[in-house]
Amino acid sequence: MLHFAPYSALSILALATCFLLVCVFEFVNGFHDTANAVATVIYTHSLKPKVAVIWSGMMNFIGVLAGGISVAYGLVELLPADVLSPPNGDPAVPMLIALFGTALAWNLFTWWFGIPNSSSHCVIGALIGVAIGDAFLHARGLGNSVDWSQIWKVLRALAISPILGLVGAGLLYTVMKLVVKDPELYVPPQGEKPPHKFVRGLLILTCTGVSFSHGSNDGQKSIGLIMLTIIGILPATFALSPNAAPHIAQIAPQAVIAAPLIEKYDHDGLRDEAIASAARLQNTDPEKVVPSMLRADIYEVIAGLKAVSNNATASAAEKKTAKDISATLRPTVEYAPWWVRLLSALCLGLGTMIGYKRIVHTLGEKIGNTHLTPAQGASAELVGAGLIATAGYTGLPVSTTHIITAGIAGTMIGSGSGINPKMLTKIALAWIFTLPITIAIAATLFYVMSM
């Protein structure tokens, strides 16, 4: 339905539309998730709201620029190779609209009702939905279109990190209560009076840490989405890294090693495509490269090598060889120009500066049976900042919202006040339904628009 010739007027219009969607999504991500960083400093009157959100926005901005791109491509590789990089150079407009439209709609829906929800879950659900829609479109089994090993890796990180946040923040709060005897840390804020300097400094520090780590992790997600947009619609210009030349020379010899490895291990019926791609890569001529075709072949081979790495019958040496070849091939196609990083940082940073009130109110007053205290907020944010920053530099997308919300719940349990079952039920239901709803919507949109 939506296939335009690259560089045509319609293609440029589609690029602009998708660009707008991804920028709006990251902007919404900023104001949806910013409450996780600024809730305690605003709620305890440690900083004025405007100062807090501007400071948080700046730290998010810096975090995006300082972060890497491992999370970005860890996410986009949830898509099958033929969607991730269409070999015929057709624009990927159905994929992009299904992805951005679904994630953005669900993010806004949960924000409107003041429910802390994960932007990461929205994106991941939409990506899985596109992969499933592609499977139906080509009459393939789900195992043939969906990289389940990558999905389980991402979902494990999303599932384990809130548990670590809950337990870690609860333990830290308990230790803090035993060691630090300042009573002001353990009572809810009174009126408009700010806490004394030590408490204020601690809360501003935790706000800074969460904001920076949020930028370093979530900013990468928008970098990946922006790269999907420009590569899918303008493949001749953006399919390969501007610094690809020295890496292209290594492709042919690596493909020679990869071909027999891939041929040895069947992986859900996709072996033929990967083998054919490996054969083409063996004849790569740096002077006659077609960017979109080369990119598509590289991702087909990487998919084949993933199957080797995940095959229980493969030897340790074969798995290591598969991972080493993938690592050699990736720099040719996985990159992010400086302006993409800057655009992501701007959208996230600006979004951080508005829209925080609904979620701040939930975090401060509705998660526990009592209102949030400075010690509880600091414990949740210190643990959260560490978990998010670690994940950002190891290539695992985690949810700032899940970690901080779980951390606050952990401190409420640690204090003995207990948690508010009604609000926790709402949050849990949003978490539970996010994936199936976004998967269903994105799969339907992609299938209908691609027919």
Image (cartoon, rainbow, N blue to C red):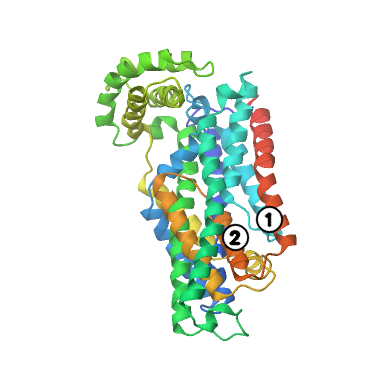
Per the image, label 1 sits on a secondary structure element best described as helix
- In the rendering, which numbered label is found on residue 179? none
Give above or below for 305 relative to 23.
above
How many dots with numbers? 2
Give the residue at x 32% y 24%: 317
| Quarter of the figure that contains the N terminus | top right
- Which is more toward the observer, 158 or 137? 158
Give above or below for 240 relative to 106.
above
Question: Which circle's residue, 1 or 2, is located before the other in the chain?
Answer: 2
- Which is more toward the observer, 255 or 172? 172
Q: Which residue is mark 2?
A: 405
- In the rendering, which numbered label is found on residue 427? 1
- Please say if the residues under marks 1 and 2 sit with CB atoms less than 8 Å apart: yes
Give above or below for 290 relative to 390.
above
The reply, left or right, for residue 338 in relation to residue 375 is left
Give the residue at x 71% y 50%: 429
